[in-house]
Image (cartoon, helix red, strand yellow):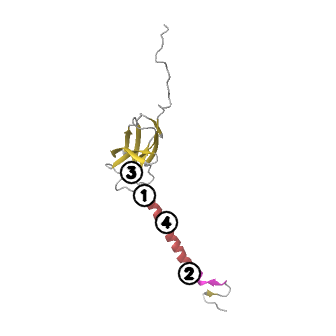
Amino acid sequence: MHVPGISVEPDKKPRCDTMTQSRPRSLQRIRALITITVFFMLCAGVATAYELTITAPSSVQKGMPLVINGSSNLPPAISVDIVLSRAEYTTEELARQTVTLQGTKEFSVIFDTKDLPKGQYKVEVPGISGYTFLGDSTTIKIVQIVDRSDEVMVKSPRTQEMDGT
C-alpha cells in the first residue's frame, strides 16, 4: 500500500518526507529569531533615557530653609524650574526658581519657609520643553512644614521678686 508523502524502503522504517523537509526551515526560523532577539537586546543596552532626580526632606521646621538638591544627565545649559506649591485640597503655586544645569549637572535650590503656615507642600519639576520622557526620574516630593509655636506655652509671672541670692 502506497500513501502519498510517505516512502518505505525495504528493511527500513517508514519516513515522512514532509517532516524531514520542514526541519531545516524551522531551524532557520529559530536561528533568525534568536539573532534578532540578541540584536534588540544589545541595542536596548546602549540606549539610555534622560533622568532628573530631586531630593527634599520629608519635613522641615517653619522658618528653616527648605533645601532642594537635584541631579540630572540632561545636557548642560538646559533650564529647569523648581516649583513650591501648597498641596492641600487644591494646589497653589507659591514660589518658582529656575536653575540652569552646568557641567556637574547637579543643582540646589533654597526656599524660605518663615511666612508659610504649617501643612503639606509639594516641590516639583514641571515638564521640560523638548524632554517629555525622563525615564525613572523623581520630579515630585512632598514636604511637611511643621510649626509647633501654637502648641508650646510658656507661663511665667510678669514680675519676680529678688530674694538676694
- Residue at 47% of width from left, 67% of height from top? 36
Question: Residue 21 bears which disc, if any?
Answer: 2
Q: Give the image location of residue 40, x and y in percent.
A: 46, 64
Q: Is residue 79 left or right of residue 137?
A: left
State which quadrant residue 98 falls in: top left
Indicate the amino acid at tag 1. Answer: Val
Q: Give the image location of residue 16, x and y in percent.
A: 62, 83
The N terminus - image quarter: bottom right
Q: Is residue 14 magenta?
A: yes
Q: N-terminal of the two: label 2 or label 3?
A: 2
Q: N-terminal of the two: label 4 or label 1?
A: 4
- Region in magenta: 13-19
Q: Is residue 95 magenta?
A: no
Indicate the amino acid at tag 4. Answer: Thr
- Tag 2 secondary structure: helix
Q: State the residue position of label 3.
A: 126
Question: Residue 46 bears which disc, if any?
Answer: 1
User: In front: mark 3 or mark 4?
Assistant: 3
Indicate the amino acid at tag 2. Answer: Gln
- Tag 1 secondary structure: helix
Q: Give the image location of residue 55, x and y in percent.
A: 44, 43
Label 1–label 2 contact, CB within 8 A? no
Q: Is residue 12 above or below residue 46?
A: below
Q: N-terminal of the two: label 1 or label 2?
A: 2
* Mark 4 Cα shell of 10 Å, populated few (<14), some (14-19), many (≥20): few
Q: State the residue position of label 4.
A: 37
From the viewer's side, name the closer residue of 91 and 134: 91
User: In front: mark 4 or mark 2?
Assistant: 4
Q: Alpha-carbon distance for marks 1 and 2? A: 39 Å
